[in-house]
Image (cartoon, rainbow, N blue to C red):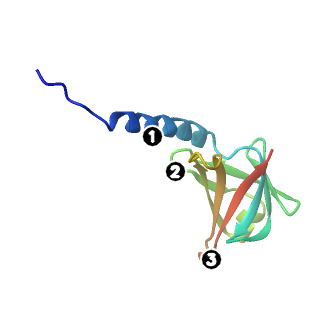
Amino acid sequence: MCKKSYPLIPAILIVLSLLGPVSAQNSAGPPIGKYQVRQYMTTLGYVTIKSNNTYEVSGVLGKYAYNPGSGEIVWKSGSYKEWGWKGKYELIPSDGTRPQQHVIRLTSEADGLKMDGWYLTQ
């Protein structure tokens, strides 16, 4: 009887173990804290995600809803609602050279302009 070798199984298990926490954390939505909003390397401002699905931009509070299935953030009120921005939360897993990163992707509904909010601190 011949034994078969499956050299890819350990690699597949490692990848799957890395993906597990991503889904769990992504389903919780963006963590509470301050995000630096940038376009390329230019800082444009900050957004603070607060408790009870609230956020703050430039001193103005607003409400948002998060869809864990799609990662979509719907701005219900406040600056991002008023300015016509769409949002999406992403959790970028660690690749061994950098820690995991929480990002809020922002897209203008008017002209498609894109910006990213990078998690700084709680």
Coordinates of residue 29 in the picture (x, y in percent): 64, 44
Q: Which residue is mark 3?
A: 110
Quadrant of residue 82 within the rendered picture: bottom right
Which residue appears at 38% of the width and 33% of the height? Answer: 10
Coordinates of residue 49 in the picture (x, y in percent): 76, 50
Question: Marks 3 and 2, how far apart in space?
Answer: 21 Å
Helix, strand or loop at label 3? It is: loop
Q: Which residue is mark 2?
A: 70
- Residue 58 placement, left or right of 16: right
Coordinates of residue 30 in the picture (x, y in percent): 67, 47
Q: Which residue is outermost to the left?
A: 1
- Residue 19 placement, left or right of 100: left
Three-letter residue code for mark 3: Ala
Question: Split into 4 quadrants, where in the image is the N terminus?
Answer: top left
Q: Nearer the viewer, mark 1 or mark 2?
A: 1
Three-letter residue code for mark 1: Val
Q: Which mark is residue 15?
A: 1
Q: Which residue is outermost to the top?
A: 1
Earlier-in-chain disc, 1 versus 3: 1
Question: Marks 1 and 3, how far apart in space?
Answer: 38 Å
Q: Which residue is outermost to the bottom?
A: 111
Question: Split into 4 quadrants, where in the image is the C terminus?
Answer: top right
Question: Marks 1 and 2, how far apart in space?
Answer: 22 Å
Q: Which residue is outermost to the right?
A: 59
